[in-house]
Amino acid sequence: MEIKLKLNGKNIMGSIEPDTLLIDFLREHGCYSVKRGCETSGCGLCTVLMDGTPVLSCSVLAARADGHEVYTLEGLQQEASDFVGFIADQGADQCGFCNPGFVMNTIALLRENPDPTDDEIRAFLAGNLCRCSGYEGQLRGIRNYLDSRKG
Amino acid sequence: MITIQKYVRPQSLEEAYQLNQNRRSRIIAGMLWTKMSSGAVNTAIDLCDLGLDTIEETDKQFSIGAMVTLRQIEQHAGLNAYTGGKAAAAVKDIIGVQFRNIATVGGSIWGRFGFSDVLTLFLAMESFVELYKGGIIPLAQFASMPYDRDLLVRLIVKKTPGSFSYQAMRAQRTDFPVLTCAVSRLDGQYRAAIGARPGRAMLIKDEEGLLTGGINEESAKAFAEYAAGKVPTGSNLRGSAAYRTHLAKVLVERGALELGGNA
């Protein structure tokens, strides 16, 4: 079946099987930041924005994305560049595998809540798993970024 | 992983219903649990074009479309005003925001999953389901029905004056719950919904009036003992039956005490 969607700002068409998952469609279209982690919809590694909302692309049929707008980290690098350096400064992304999912969900968080508390950050990012860091580094990085904006 | 031969977005409930009469068809809701299953699906029926993704609020009730996400439940001002924030409290630890942006009320309620925080939450309210062919029936009745091939269209929650508490025991935040428990006072009547037993959530009403004289430590404990005694529990990798029964007593007591006040 054929689908049309807007991917990272560009209108694209694609031919898919009815059971193609969005994550596989996106990787076939060069979005390698979107990765498979847990296969149980629990790790947040495959997070993309669909119509501006963070979703797990491993659990969305590509067919459902037909007619919608999808952003991956490839299309949001400028927005991400505002804060990823602060996370890196904390050594939070040690192996880096979880990082795209964290960054995508942090973008979603900051769009929805530009000045979150630490508890709000923890709650919003609870669906992003990291096996290296223990999460405090990501929290410190985001906090430092937010504090830097306040001068 | 399931395989899907054909994907369809019906343009009417009747079309969806007819497609779903084939036993190899399957309704696609959030796709989260479906994805974890195995087998061959002939026709995947996606209800996303049917306008079932909104919560309509009137003076008397909430009408929650089957495709409303758990995140919408979490963020809906009216629903959380009515429940004192317990709607958000019940779903906030379900995996993560990205998961709750996909998972639907219809999928949770239709699935009648034992682990469902959503079913437990709404059982404690005056809730009904609207089935396409089966009409409007109490949620408690639906929760004990076998699966059939009807469509769940909406969840209806009456704004019966009341107060609510919600407790869940998880070994770890975002994990499946070991036990879920919602306690409510609706028009002076008390009830407790207990889920993750690990079976489907059950509704226990205070038919002996243990709390009608007022809630204190003694009456809350008596109601907790009563409710836990009515609810069969089982064992799985998350906990034993004995542990769950103990948790049921603790969580019902805490829930009742949180409601507080007099009838």
Image (cartoon, helix red, strand yellow):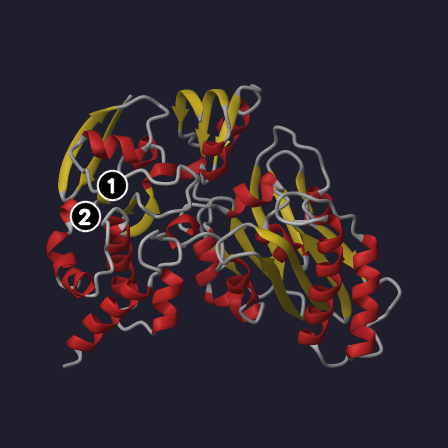
Residue to which mark 2 is pinned: A73
Q: Is residue B247 above or below residue A25?
A: below
Marked residue nearer the N-terminal end (1 or 2): 1
* Mark 1: secondary structure: loop
Q: Residue B186 at x, y = what percent?
A: 72, 67
Q: Position of residue B225 (x, y in %)?
A: 82, 63
Q: Secondary structure at mark 2?
A: helix
Frontmost residue, B26 versus A125: A125
At a point 56% along the width and 19% down the height, the residue shown is B22
Question: In front here: B51 or A83?
Answer: A83
Picture quadrant where residue A148 is located: bottom left
| Label 1 close to label 2 by CB (< 8 Å) | yes
Looking at the picture, tell me which residue is in the foreground, B183 or A151. Answer: A151
Q: At x 78% / y 52%, what residue is drawn?
A: B231
Residue kind at label 1, given as amino acid type: Val
User: Which subunit holds the residue at mark 1?
Assistant: A
- In the image, which disc is placed on residue B124? none
Nearest the viewer among B225 and B131 is B225
Which x, y percent locates residue B214?
80, 79
Residue at x 27%, y 31% (from the top left corner) = A24
Q: Which quarter of the rendering shows the C terminus of chain B?
A: bottom right
Could you confirm whether marks 1 and 2 are on the same chain?
yes
Residue at image position (20%, 77%) is A147
Could you tell me if residue B142 is visible in this image?
Answer: yes
Residue A34 disc label:
1
Q: CA distance from mark 1 to mark 2?
A: 8 Å
Chain label for disc 2: A
